[in-house]
Amino acid sequence: MTSLPPLFLVLELPLFSMKALHQRMEEHQAFWMWPSMEPDNSTALSADGYHKYKEDIKVMSDTGLEAYRFSISWSRLLPYGRGTVNEKGVQYYNSVLEELAKRGIPAHVTLNHLDIPQVLQDEYGGWLSPKIVKDFKEFADVCFREFGSKVSHWTTITEPNIIGLTGDFVPHSWCSPKFETINCYADSSADWIYIKVHNMLIAHSEAVRLYRTKYQRYQGGWIGLNIYSFWCQPFSNSSADLEATLRVKSFMFDWVLSPVTIGDYPELMKSIASTRLPSFTNSQSEVLKGSFDFMAINYYASGYISDNSNSSKAGASGFQADMAAIMRVNKNDPPTMGPFLPTRVPEDFSGLEKMLHYLKEKYGNPPIYIHENGFAAGLENVLNDTARIAYLEGYIGSTLEASRSGVQVRGYFVWSFLDVYEFLGGYKKGFGLYHVDFDDEKRHRTPKLSAHWYSSFLKNNVSVVFSIESAGLEATSLYSQ
């Protein structure tokens, strides 16, 4: 594929790469909702974006980016979860935003990316308690006030629905010194998954209401929500697998997007989970309705869905049993309940286009951003990453096809700018366009072949502007409002 739009000009760097405004600045801890699956849990420095942000942003500019997405650490701004603001944290994030502005790179900022202050986890169990709504709103208020004039797009929470997939291996929120839990264990059978996401949705809506009533008029930004996504295709044509595919869409996507659109959970989900699924009050429902200016998805792969109704008959309960489905990336793969880690280039890239059309048809064609799309590679021959190029080229093409057919795709972010510490792969799997030498104290960056390809694509590809214009989109910048 040679003719792709000059509109998809963005990259992302996760919170770990900033790590931490870091521990020597402020010794307060963050609780990670998704602990690493890797034994090399040495995340203290990662790519050291804290010290190297100026040179990194210069590289972004040299690469040709039109936008950049990163997340803010709650515990670095409000070390006690509320109240006292860490001015060093404010200064650091303002420095990053000012450097981006100097280079002409708009900032897309995420408020919550899987972490909360440990003190709130210890005090009331984090997202398990409705008390977190007030504290999250205070954190959001600090961010809007201190940084809002420099931020074009806010995302309240990244991937709240990922809890549904990770419930089998992520410790529940009582794994905290406060509760004197010695052996933390996963508990996917309890209803805590529903409760956490319920509180996340209410917190999201309150943050959006705050932004719209207090800041948006004069700051001029947009605000939305992000979900983890994958296109769902039935494993077979059996009625059981077709029904299971519908359940997965309802439980994984509509679970979050239906409340922010119509103010309530999807009917299929309510009929299955019944009273174990929390309900919204009338006032909460009204605040939730329309609480987004854009929707955003993280997308890595498609999945084959087969029925697993026997799980509930065997006595299992909770989110996974309610969804009652088995997922595979490829038909010959073993079943997986966790997020898909893309390590093979797919033969068919149309799943992303289909996912985008699903959102268009289900939710009235909202503006959509692809916040994450990327390819995991191992430690062999890291600089000659031709597989990553094929992966990105295929999915950018799939995104283009969706925009040509009327989907309001406003931006595409590659995961990720640098190799960083990955939740699922530690330092053994790198998604970055730029290699980071983690054995070097200076964390030297080296462009991979994909970085050269992507930069060339961004700077030189202008032949499809007419196709974009015919789809009714801005021909100069897909991130524009």
Image (cartoon, grey):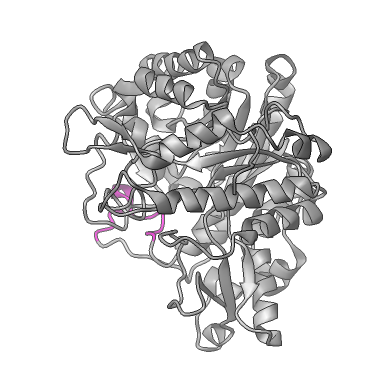
Q: Does the magenta run of residues contain 23?
A: no
Across and down, in percent, residue 334 comes to 43, 78
Q: Main secondary structure of the magenta part?
A: loop
Q: Is residue 289 left or right of residue 192?
A: right
Q: Residue at x 71, y 86 (%)?
A: 239
Across and down, in percent, residue 302 comes to 57, 64
Quadrant in which residue 223 is drawn: top right
- Residue 451 versus residue 40 in the image, above or below: above
- Residue 172 versus residue 410 in the image, above or below: below
Can residue 199 be spotted in the picture?
Answer: no
Of 379 and 459, nearer the camera is 459
Across and down, in percent, residue 119 comes to 37, 37
Across and down, in percent, residue 244 comes to 65, 77
Q: Residue at x 57, y 16 (%)?
A: 150
Of 470 and 270, nearer the camera is 470
Of 379 and 421, nearer the camera is 379
Quadrant in which residue 108 is drawn: top right
Of 61 and 227, nearer the camera is 61
Q: Is residue 463 left or right of residue 112?
A: right
Quadrant in which residue 96 is drawn: top left
Q: Is residue 154 left or right of residue 76?
A: right
Q: Which residues are magenta?
A: 170-182
Quadrant of image for the C terminus: top right
